Image (cartoon, helix red, strand yellow):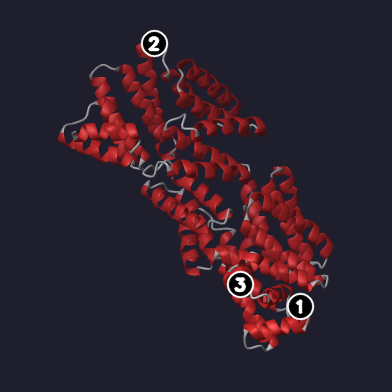
């Protein structure tokens, strides 16, 4: 077989990188015809070579025109238009290709599936103009054309457009039901990989706008499995990678989140878009901040700012973590004055509560927490409700209203557990521990601090590990000989002959944490060995 045959075979198998290599080699030997240029363009698009894809498809369009294939040329023009329209800086070119496709289809004077794609293009223009009701109707019409011609790609694209329009019209239940149906088609392999990537990124964007973390997590996990079956495919683009990184961060997969954020930075810079890299750099900065890499966080926040993305509230929280409370307070108050977008304001308000409490301004923190509760009620989604309850609990802890604090924190804990957000759950447990301590329940407090420490260590949240360790160390130990409740649990298990690994498994903590508890036990009891600790446990009837 020659390079051309190898390339066609690779296309049939979905081996996109191999297809691109073979078809490019064949094209270098003898220029490909329009059909094979379309195959080359598709392979290039699916491995992230967008400029090469556009070049090949432009040649395919020209070839169709030369041989008088108007509908073939229209199909290439439509694919070019949809590839370009996502980038605002290329939107005029996209409109030009749509106009070219319209003229060619009109000249052909036949009923064809391409007319459905043109209706989708009109729907997109209505979306850009803010006419969502008109857009919804056009996408519905396009889906009907797709059904008439049994074109699953058109059906999926049009229905996803209709779903997004319904969400924008505040008909969330109807819109999300449509988006879920389309995603079922995507992960079931019913649509082509190009449309699969487009639809997934759009659905994740909708989930982001709605604070629908649970749905975003579910579809991200499903698509992760789907992508594993297509390892050489790059179906996601820069903005989509940022959303994926955010979901991974919330789920506690910080290493994967960093990698995805870096890919987003590289992809968006390669596309030379003036503003979008800012979101990617900001997400990368947030991950560095949480991990305690101050220098890397500073650099990423600076790059985000240069790209047009204001580095708040992250930069204020970084200053707070560095102990620069006055600088953090001044910056977050400015951010509160400037931020009006509902989603962004939720995050700024949450940061403001934390920083203002550290500053000692309880009235301002309470005002921010109250506004956060109001916005959570308006947004009507679990994520902002958890953020608002957590903030209200933190304020109540500082106001020494432990009962109110525990009620609010319990609400936040329940939501974070349901959403599977380990970092925020650990932060709630720290506040819960402080509330228990104020009620005199030091054992309960230490159990909460230990659970939080375990979670922070597992995530790699260095600053939080150090902060909570310091909080836990300030206790007035109520337990025998100064041992905390968790240390007594470890001592009892040592007395049974359990190894550090067995103790870690029994208590659901790491061996590193067990070793830390063991060191504390030896120091507090002035004991030289495990056998001496065992004797102490039996002597004091702890076993």
Q: Taking 368 as reference, is 475 above or below it?
A: below
Left or right: 63 in relation to 433: left
Measured Cα–Cα span from mark 1 to mark 3 = 21 Å
Residue displayed at 46% across by 64% down: 299
Residue displayed at 49% across by 65% down: 298
Quadrant location, the C terminus: bottom right
Residue displayed at 39% across by 23% down: 99
Disc ID at residue 110: 2
Residue 322 visible to the viewer: no
Category of crowding for the residue at label 2, using alpha-carbon neighbours closer than 10 angstroms: few (below 14), some (14–19), many (at least 20)? few
Pick whichever of labels 2 and 3 is earlier in the sequence. 2
Depth check, mark 1 against mark 3: the one in front is: 1
Q: Name the foreground residue: 354 vs 468.
A: 468
Disc 1 secondary structure class: loop
Find residue 301 and report its horizontal and vertical position in percent. 50, 60
Q: Name the foreground residue: 372 vs 540.
A: 540
Query: Number of marks in the image?
Result: 3
Find residue 504 and report its horizontal and vertical position in percent. 61, 68
Q: Based on the displayed image, in which of its 4 quarters is residue 456 positioned?
A: bottom right
Left or right: 28 in relation to 290: left
Pick whichever of labels 1 and 3 is earlier in the sequence. 3
Disc 3 secondary structure class: helix
- Are the residues flagged by discs 2 and 3 in contact, CB closer than 8 Å? no
Category of crowding for the residue at label 1, using alpha-carbon neighbours closer than 10 angstroms: few (below 14), some (14–19), many (at least 20)? some
Quadrant location, the N terminus: top left
Disc ID at residue 542: 1
Pick whichever of labels 2 and 1 is earlier in the sequence. 2
- Are the residues flagged by discs 2 and 1 in contact, CB closer than 8 Å? no
Q: Taking 250 as reference, is 499 above or below it?
A: below
Find residue 92 and report its horizontal and vertical position in percent. 40, 33
Disc ID at residue 513: 3
């Amino acid at each position: 077989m020659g390079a051309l045959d190898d390339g066609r075979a690779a296309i049939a198998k979905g081996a996109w990188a191999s297809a691109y290599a073979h078809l490019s080699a064949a094209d270098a030997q003898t220029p490909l015809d329009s059909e094979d240029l379309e195959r080359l363009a598709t392979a290039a698009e699916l491995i992230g070579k967008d400029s090469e894809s556009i070049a090949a498809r432009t040649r395919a369009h020209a070839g169709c025109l030369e041989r008088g294939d108007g509908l073939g040329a229209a199909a290439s023009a439509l694919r070019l238009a949809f590839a370009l329209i996502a980038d605002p800086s290329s939107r005029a070119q996209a409109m030009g290709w749509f106009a070219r496709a319209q003229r060619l289809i009109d000249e052909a004077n036949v009923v064809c599936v391409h007319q459905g794609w043109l209706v989708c293009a009109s729907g997109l223009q209505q979306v850009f103009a803010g006419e969502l009701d008109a857009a919804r109707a056009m996408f519905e019409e396009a889906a009907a054309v797709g059904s008439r011609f049994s074109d699953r790609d058109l059906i999926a694209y049009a229905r996803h457009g209709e779903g997004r329009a319904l969400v924008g019209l505040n008909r969330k239940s109807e819109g999300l039901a449509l988006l879920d149906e389309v995603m079922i088609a995507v992960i079931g392999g019913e649509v082509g990989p190009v449309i699969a990537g487009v639809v997934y990124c759009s659905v994740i964007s909708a989930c982001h706008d709605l604070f629908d973390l649970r749905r975003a997590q579910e579809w991200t996990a499903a698509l992760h499995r789907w992508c594993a079956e297509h390892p050489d495919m790059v179906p996601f683009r820069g903005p989509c990678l940022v959303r994926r990184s955010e979901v991974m961060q919330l789920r506690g997969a910080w290493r994967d989140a960093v990698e995805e954020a870096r890919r987003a930075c590289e992809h968006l810079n390669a596309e030379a878009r003036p503003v979008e890299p800012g979101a990617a750099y900001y997400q990368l900065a947030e991950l560095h901040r949480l991990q305690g890499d101050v220098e890397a966080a500073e650099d990423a926040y600076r790059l985000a700012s240069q790209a047009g993305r204001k580095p708040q509230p992250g930069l204020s929280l970084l200053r707070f973590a560095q102990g620069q409370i006055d600088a953090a307070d001044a910056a977050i108050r400015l951010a509160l004055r400037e931020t009006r977008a509902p989603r962004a304001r939720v995050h700024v308000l949450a940061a403001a509560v934390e920083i203002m409490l550290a500053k000692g301004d309880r009235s301002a923190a309470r005002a921010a927490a109250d506004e956060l509760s109001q916005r959570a009620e308006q947004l009507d989604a679990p994520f902002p409700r958890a953020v608002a309850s957590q903030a209200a609990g933190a304020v109540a802890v500082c106001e020494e209203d432990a009962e109110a604090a525990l009620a609010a924190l319990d609400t936040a804990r329940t939501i974070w557990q349901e959403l599977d957000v380990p970092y925020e759950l650990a932060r709630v447990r720290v506040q819960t521990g402080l509330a228990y301590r104020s009620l005199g329940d030091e054992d309960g407090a230490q159990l909460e601090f230990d659970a939080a420490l375990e979670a922070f260590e597992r995530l790699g949240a260095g600053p939080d590990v150090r902060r909570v360790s310091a909080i836990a160390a300030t206790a007035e130990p109520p337990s025998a000989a100064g041992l905390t409740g968790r240390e007594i649990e470890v001592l009892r298990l040592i007395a049974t002959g359990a190894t550090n690994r067995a103790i870690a498994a029994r208590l659901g903590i790491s061996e590193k944490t067990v070793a830390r508890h063991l060191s504390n036990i030896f120091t507090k009891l002035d004991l030289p060995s495990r056998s001496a600790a065992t004797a102490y446990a039996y002597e004091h009837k702890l076993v």
